[in-house]
Amino acid sequence: MRAVWYERNGGSEVLTLGEMPTPEPGPGEVLVRLAASGVNPSDWKTRRGSTRPMAFPRVIPHSDGAGVIEAVGEGVARGRIGERVWIWNGQWKRPFGTAAEYIALPAAQAVPLPEGTSFEEGACLGIPALTALHAVATDGGVTGRRVLVTGGAGAVGHYAIQFARLLGAAQILATVSGEAKAAHAMAAGADATINYRREEVPARVMELTGGRGVDRVVEVDLAGNGPMLHRLCAYGAVVAGYGSNTQEAVFPFSPTIQKGIAVRFFIVYELDAAQRAAAIGALQAWLARGLVRHAVAARLPLAECARAHDEVEQGRHIGNVVLAC
Ligand SMILES: NC(=O)c1ccc[n+]([C@@H]2O[C@H](COP(=O)([O-])OP(=O)(O)OC[C@H]3O[C@@H](n4cnc5c(N)ncnc54)[C@H](OP(=O)(O)O)[C@@H]3O)[C@@H](O)[C@H]2O)c1
C-alpha cells in the first residue's frame, strides 16, 4: 500500500511517501480501506517530538480517518465487511495511523459512518468533534448555562459551539480574531462573538452576560487566557482546558480561588470507555439527524502530507485539512 511515514522527529521534511506491506487484520480487528485522513495539530506536534518522544522506529501519522471495512479478523462479524466507518485513536499508542491506503485496528475504533456524512467529514470526528463534545459535556455539562468558547472558529471550537447549542446552553459567546472567523462562529450557533485581539474580552463577556459572567469556558489557550479567566467567569465556573499555545499557564491565585474556578484538563485520546461511549453515542445520533455542520477547509492528496502538516501548523485554514488517501 501507499503510505506516508517518518522515522525521526523533525520538520515536515521527515515525512516520506512510499510503499509498505498492506496490514492484515488480527483477532478483533478490522482492515479499513481509507478514503480520507484528517490532519490535526497533535499530528505535527507529535512529528516534531514536542509532546511525546518517538515511541516506534517508524510512524505513519494521523489518528483520524474514514473509509470502508474491507476485511475482518477472527472474532469480528463478517457482516461488517463493506461498512463505511470513521476512525478514532488511529495513531495513539500504535505506530501506524491513517496517512495510508489501509489501516488495521481494533474493531471498536471503526465506528459506522452515518449515511449523510462524507468520508472527508468522517475524518474530522475522532479528534475535533469528540474533543468538543467532551469539553461541553464533562463536569455537569452546559445545559442551561452561559458558555464561552475561546477560538470559536477553530476545528474544535466550531463543533463546541454547535454541541453547546444542541445540549441547550442558555447563551454561547465565542472569541475570534477577525470577521470571517466571527461569521463562521455565528453560523455554528454562537449568540455573539468577541474579537480577542481588538476588544477587552472580560469586559465584553460581562456586558453580554448582564454582569453575571460565564459558567463554562471551552478553552483553546489556557496559557494565553488563564490570567483573565477570573474576570469573566461566574462563581463556580468550570473551564474545560483542552489546549494551550505555550507550556506554562499562570492563574492569579486569590482572584481565581475567590471565583471557585475549576479547570478540567483532558486529552481526547485518553477518554475512558464510558466517556467515549457517551460522546460517540450523542454524536452518532446528531449525525444521523443531519444536525452537525462540518468545516472541511482543504483537501490535499496523500502525496502532499508535508504541505498539509505545514498548513495546519501555521493555522492557515478555518476548519480541517483532510488528505485523500
Ligand atoms: N486536549 C485534546 O485532546 C485536544 C484535542 C484537539 C485539539 N487540541 C489542541 O487544541 C488546540 C486547537 O486545536 P484545533 O484543531 O481546534 O486547532 P485550529 O483549528 O487551528 O483552531 C485553533 C483556533 O484557536 C484560535 N486561537 C488561538 N489562540 C487563541 C487565543 N489565545 N484565544 C482565542 N482564540 C485563539 C485560532 O485562531 P486565531 O489564531 O486566528 O485566533 C483558531 O481559530 C491545539 O493546541 C490542539 O493541539 C487538544
Image (cartoon, rainbow, N blue to C red):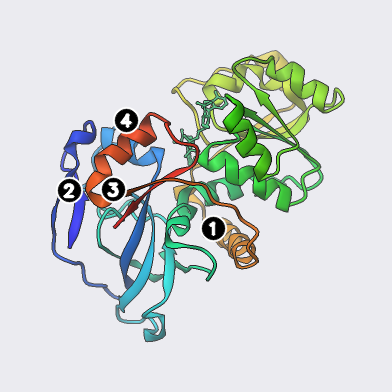
Q: Position of residue 48 (x, y in %)?
A: 27, 32
Kindly identify which residue carries mark 2: 58
Whole-angstrom CA distance, mark 1 to mark 4, is 26 Å
Q: Is residue 202 above or below residue 2?
A: above
Answer yes or no: is residue 106 visible.
yes
Disc 3 is placed on an element classified as: loop
Label 1, ligand 1: CB separation under 8 Å: no
Q: Residues within 10 Å of mark 1 (few under 14, many from 20)?
A: some
Q: How far is mark 3 from mark 1, CA to CA?
A: 22 Å
Mark earlier in primary sequence (3, 1): 3
Dot 1 falls on a residue whose secondary structure is: helix
Q: Which marked residue is nearer to the observer: mark 3 or mark 4?
A: 3
Identify whether 50 is placed above or below 36: above
Q: Quadrant of residue 232?
A: top right
Residue appearing at x 32%, y 40% in the figure: 308
For the residue pair 113 and 131, the one nearer the viewer reads as 113
Q: Hey, what amino acid is under mark 2? A: Arg
Closer to the chain start, of discs 3 and 4, is 4
Q: Real-space Cα distance between discs 2 and 3? A: 10 Å
Residue nearer the viewer, 277 or 14:
14
Q: Which residue is mark 4?
A: 50
